[in-house]
Each structure stands twice: as C-alpha cells, then as structure tokens.
Image (cartoon, rainbow, N blue to C red):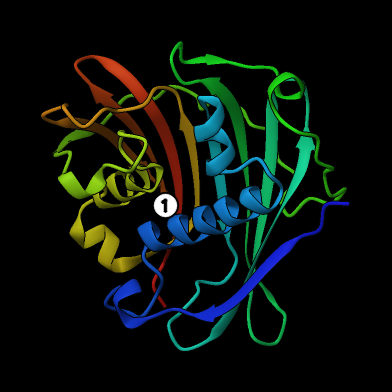
Amino acid sequence: MTEKLSRTHALRTYQCDRYGHVRPLILMNELQALADDHAEILGVGRSYCLAHDVAWVVTHYYVDIIEMPNESEELTFTTWPSVQDALRATRDFEIRGADGRLMVRATSQWILIDVARRRPLRLADYLPHWDVVAARAWDRTFDRHPDFVPEKSHVMKCRYDDVDVNQHINNAVYAVWATESVGFPFRNQHQLRRIELNFKKEIRPDQPQVIVDVACRDCISRHRIMTDGVEHATIVCEWVPNK
C-alpha cells in the first residue's frame, strides 16, 4: 500500500529572499526533491528510469501559496501520488507549519517518455504497479492557459547552473524566469500567491537566449517562454501586495 512521504526541516537563510520568504526556485526544488525521493521508494524513480531508458516529464505544476513559508519556522513537506490513468500520473503536495496549519498546496501532472524517441509511454506497460492515495491536496484540472497579448518581453540567458542531469533546463528555472520578468519594482511590492506552470517542450542548454513575453494586470501576470519562435511553456502567476 502506498503511503504519503513527509519530511520536516526549516528553510535556510540562503533559500529565502530579502524579506525572509522562500524563493520560487527553492520552493519548486523542495517539492521536486521530495517527489524524487518518493518515486525512488515506490520503485519508479531515477534509478529505475536510468536502467530502463525512460524518464518522467512534468506537464503541469500548480502551486497555491496560502501562507508564504519563511526561514524562521520548521516546515513539514508531504507528497503522494493521487491520480493515475493510462498515460498520466498526478502527484500532490502539502507544506504545513509547525502547528499543522496548511501553508502551501500543490498538484502536478507527469508523463513517462521513451528517452530515445521522446514519445509518451503507457504507464502500466513500463512501470511496476503502485497504488495511489485517494486524497487531493488541490483538486484541479490541468487546463490549457488562454492566449494573451504581451505588454513587454524580457531576454533571459540559459546559465550553466540552470541545466540539470537530464541535460535540459531545470523545471524550477521557469518559475524564476516568470517571477523575475514582472520587474523589480512590482516584485518588490508584491508577494507571490499562486503559480501555474504548463510545460510544453524542453529547453536544451545550447539555446543562447530565452524570450519571456509578459502581460500583467490586476495582480495577475501571464508569461510565455519562447526560443527561436518555439513555445516551451506558459505560466500564470497571482500576486498580492506586500503588507
């Protein structure tokens, strides 16, 4: 029987921004690290994938920040597989404070691909069986983001440290590009409340630059990640003014 995996620790100072709030990059990587550990426990993690020439690819990541995690509190991070069909697996997350209050809820959708052909695979044909936990942290459907007219565009660089062991830009970097592209004054006056990432095509490290189209209105920012005219991801962020 599949059980939830929980880990408890406090955020370090270097993981937080100037106001002591968790950085988007760190938040996404904390969730990803926990998911990686749980996949290994279930026998479908990186070790299994390397041995069978398959890989997990995330298509959607939705993160709802009810209360921004800070460096001063011990936090409990929890994850579990919640839904599965023929081609897609859903993994949910929660972050709770020291008193058990819910601070962050998140959900993500994944597909399994053949590494050589980059084609989706039927999960039951290539993975050992595991049970899902019949509970949702955030019961959301994974919808396509509506198109938008950009107000401005930013040029981002693919840094060496943005590339992960799968030889493409790490998923968490997309969250950084989105949240940085709203500009310093807006970012300094607002706090991230929600981020929804829809991944479409990986970015390889040989791309010289990344274009981030942005439109921001009424504390909602919309982002489109492009290289050479190819759309790699769309992102929607919700913000609240700093108190």
Q: Is residue 28 left or right of residue 63?
A: left
Label 1: state its secondary structure: loop
Residue at mark 1: 219
Q: Residue furthest left?
A: 208
- Near mark 1 (Cα within 10 A), the count class, few <14, some 14-19 or many ≥20, is some
Residue 195: image location, x then y, percent = 48, 49
In this rendering, the answer to whether 57 lies above or below 8 is above
Query: Looking at this view, is 216 or 198 the one in front?
Result: 198
Q: What residue do we see at 60% from left, 66% from top?
A: 66
Residue 177: image location, x then y, percent = 28, 45
Q: What residue do we see at 80% from left, 35% from top?
A: 129
Using the rendered view, name the quadrant where residue 159 is placed: top left
Q: What residue do we see at 44% from left, 23% from top?
A: 200
Can the viewer see residue 181 in this picture? no
Q: Is residue 156 left or right of residue 99?
A: left
In this rendering, the answer to whether 54 lies above or below 92 is above
Image quarter in which the C terminus is found: bottom left
Residue 109: image location, x then y, percent = 62, 35
Using the rendered view, name the quadrant where residue 78 is placed: bottom right
Q: At label 1, which amino acid type do we have? A: Cys
